Amino acid sequence: MAARNHGAFAADAAASVLEQDYEPLELIAIDDASDDETADVLEDCAAAAPRGRMVVVRHERQEGIAATRANALRLAEGDFIGLLDSDDLWLPGKVRPQVELLADDPGLGLTHAAFEAFNSETGQALPWDPEWDLEDDQLVELVRRGCFIMPGTTLIRRAAIDTRGVGFVTLDYASYDDYLLFLTIALDWRFAYEPRTVMRYRRHEGNLTNLLFAGNLPRARLDLLAEFLRRFPEARDRLGPERRRTPARLLIRAAVYERTRDPAQAAASLLSALRQHPGAAVGEITSVLRSRRLTRVA
């Protein structure tokens, strides 16, 4: 559990883990130099938990989400690793079926599941429907669709994390360390998806996701995919035409974001998209124009 400035939510998040009906489970919660009472709340939870059930570590200075997760991973001793941010909730019964899935299938590296997004102030459920093709190569889908896996729903085989030695890497763009990890695991391991809902994802003003979506998200994905292919050039053949189609589409989306902020960069992105894959670039331009027309009509 990576935690920062979630003093109002951290106790509920910790309880949702500690109350799982799976006994050999340890919660490692790391406070990333919070400015509020988050660390104290977590330490109170650890003191109330059975001996050895919960460990709390305080960072003296803020290190970021990736470094915080990496620190927790170094301390973890289990064969399976789960993730939960300190403002979200695991639902009862989340862990045991996932452990059984992984234990029964040694080729399975990661299992993930459905989740419910909700408004933190009202409790109202919010629509959140990522789409991907379960029948297709999951590596290709992660490139084509983006990170459709909600980290808090996962249970990951430790050996799958260790295979390529990547773990949680600090990147220039916040909150994409899990995306790089999932891409890397998909090189060697299969994924399984459960349609049951195992997690509640809290939406509030302090979400790290808000920072991600406020920036040039297409450019961030482009940079992430370039870094992935730089590290693992063997993935190029497996991706096939998608290796050029997806960057072309992302470059068009990046150009849309950049056109009023940096017109020269937007023009360069457009030309680069047409060089990458003319058909995908033109198709994405058409999609952007169509969506804008629909928005004006609405």
Image (tube, rainbow, N blue to C red):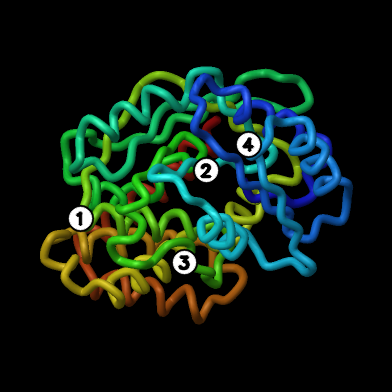
How far is disc 3 from disc 4 in space, using C-alphas? 41 Å
**Residue 45: horizontal and vertical position, in percent?**
77, 35
Classify mark 2: helix, strand or loop.
loop
Front position in the image: 103 or 24: 24
Q: Judging from the image, what secondary structure is the residue with disc 1 in?
A: loop
Q: Earlier in the sequence, mark 1 or mark 3?
A: 1
Q: Which residue is mark 2?
A: 83
Q: Give percent across and percent down for residue 192.
A: 27, 34
Q: Residues within 10 Å of mark 4 (few under 14, many from 20)?
A: some
Comparing 75 with 133, the one in front is 75
Left or right of 84: which side holds 42?
Answer: right
* C-alpha separation, residue under disc 1 versus residue under disc 3: 27 Å
Disc sitting over residue 219 in the figure: 3
Upstream in sequence: badge 4 or badge 2: 4
Q: CA distance from mark 1 to mark 2?
A: 21 Å
Mark 2 or 3: in front is: 2
